Amino acid sequence: MNEDNLISRLARVQSAITLGTSDRTPISLVMDYKFPCRHKGITQGEHFRNQSRGFHALLEIFDELGGWDIAFTDTMTTPIRNILEAPMVIKVPGKDIPDDDVIQWEETEVLKQGDYDRIIELGWKKFIADFYPRFRGWGTAEYQRRVEQKAGLELTSIRAFNKQWEQRGIPILGGAGPFSPLMMLSCSRSMTKFMLDIHRTPDKVKAVMDAMVSDIISVTIQSVKDSGIEPPMGIPAALIVLERGGCGYFPVKVFERFELPYLKQMVEAFVAEGITPILHFDQDWTLNLPYLKELPRGKCIAQFDSTTDIFKANEILRDHICIMGDVSASLLSLGTPDEVANYCKKLIDVVGESEGFILGVGCSVPVDAKFENLKAMIDTAKTYRAH
Amino acid sequence: MSKLSTALANLEEEKVRTLVEQRVNAGSEPMSIVNELRQGMDTVGERYKSKEYFLSELIISGEIFKEAMAVVEPLLKAGKKGEPLGRIVLGTVKGDIHNIGKDIVATLLTAAGFEVYDLGVDVKTNMFIDKLVRTNAPILGMSGLLTPSFQSMKQTVDALKEAGLRDKVKVIIGGGIVTEQVGKYVGADAFTSDAAEGVEICKKFVGALN
């Protein structure tokens, strides 16, 4: 086997996305600070007090595991994140919850029903600019000052971190992580309130989503451009966060009206700009899978978290969309290396058989994954059916 | 099925509100109204099982049911409630604040006639044990959506054994990432990632106990 480098790794992943052949199944672990900090004895709260600690721990873990083919990177600064992620109440370790607990988002009504008309009137970007200072309890000028200051520090950190990947010969995948309009509203209204909104005032919800999507698209595209990610150092990508629009939550007729049209708009706009959409499917989307054939062939990655039947996804979507996944959080936390390796081999045999497959974890590496299980994943990907 | 049951099964909020008000004003026996609401929820459950309804319909029906019960329950005289079908202590475990799944299960169990002692989220082991002892509830339901919740669940089951309660309490765990492997690790009697299935399991527990 030739020694890997930035070019060969990038080519392997690009081949999977475009449904071409390659020397072996590519692997990428979506890993943030959580597991590395826990494994290195750094509390979750310590990462929030000093974010470089978590990032350095991640790079150490990467090196100790023998690395993977492409690194998911977060390039969003706070001003961008505020527009592309749902406004929610966040419980930060060491501040709101015990120091070594995992960060969590509270299911509570942040956006009120009255905000719907305001979003329709202003569009999403202007609404957020108006909303966040009130949400944080600061004046607009004070909010602006704090956010800009934070963004400056974040940008420095992001650039330094991405340089580390380049020095290791690892391409990066990223640029922005927008929520879909449905996911945004469900998280910010709270799931129950949003479901009642769809039930009681569906036309209003539709009008709000119509008013949101163009700003989500334009800010995503700008964020990806500003990240500077492009070949050979990486693949410009937008990770579209999708969970609450699938059959795990709603009947297909709701997906058809309130999720699919916006997903298509987002995907088509990103693809036109040379941005790879990563469809991050959390929870069950099995009944929705056939609709993904309406998306452009060989341009997207569909990432599953082990709740959707990935083998069914393969039957329906092979030769149309690159599939990524789906070693589950439970298996990584409780399983043995042999169990993990055997499942990875099954994925490579079945889903990888038609190319267009990237081995990955379900969602992201859990905080209490076993190191040896992650090693088993990586070693299996690099050696099993490799030529 | 009565008009009220049908309206609830069809998620017709206004109609349920109106019918409950009419029945209360007409002096209907409150327990008869509760039973009809429960029948409506049973139909919702059947439609969910046949995949006509999804999680959203479970949640919406639960909200309509709770609103109706808020009107009727205060009218139920003490002793007229009848014996509950079963009793369960329920909560999301320590370190986890996810509540949606637990809340749906609580509503569905109440609709099915269970007495539910909902301890909320981030519940420590000793709180579960204390409540089980004080209520003599024979079922413990633990919810979690993060992998650290597995440890909290296991600790609670171990604490049940230490307290000499394990043989008296059936344990069911639930959550999106819960699998058979997790169930075995924790030492639970049952596991599920589906709220409606959780209710059926609890009904079987009660059947087995009786």
Image (cartoon, rainbow, N blue to C red):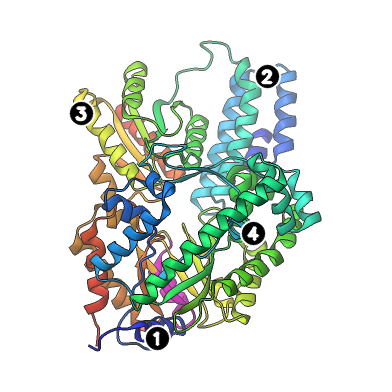
Image quadrant where one finds the N terminus of chain B: top right
Q: Nearer the viewer, mark 1 or mark 2?
A: 1
Name the image quarter holding residue A295: bottom right
Q: Label 2: which residue?
A: B28
Which SS class for mark 3?
helix
Q: Are marks 1 and 3 in contact (CB under 8 Å)?
A: no
Q: Are marks 1 and 2 in contact (CB under 8 Å)?
A: no
Choose between A280 and A138: the one closer to the eye.
Answer: A138
Q: Position of residue A140 (x, y in %)?
A: 72, 46
Discs 1 and 4 lie in a common subunit: yes
**Picture disc at residue A185:** none
Distance Cα–Cα, label 1 vs label 2: 73 Å
Q: For the view shown, which residue lies furthest in the right direction?
A: A121
Q: Judge whether residue A89 is colored magenta.
A: no
Q: Label 3: which residue?
A: B161
Stretch of the chain drawn in magenta? A308-324
Q: Label 1: which residue?
A: A11
Chain letter of the residue beneath label 2 in the structure image: B
- Using the image, determine if residue B86 lies above or below residue A353: above
Q: Are marks 1 and 4 in contact (CB under 8 Å)?
A: no
Sequence order check: which comes first, mark 1 or mark 4?
Answer: 1
Choose between A273 and B32: the one closer to the eye.
Answer: A273
**Picture disc at residue A181:** 4
Chain letter of the residue beneath label 3 in the structure image: B
Q: Are marks 2 and 4 in contact (CB under 8 Å)?
A: no
- Using the image, determine if residue A4 lies above or below residue A191: below
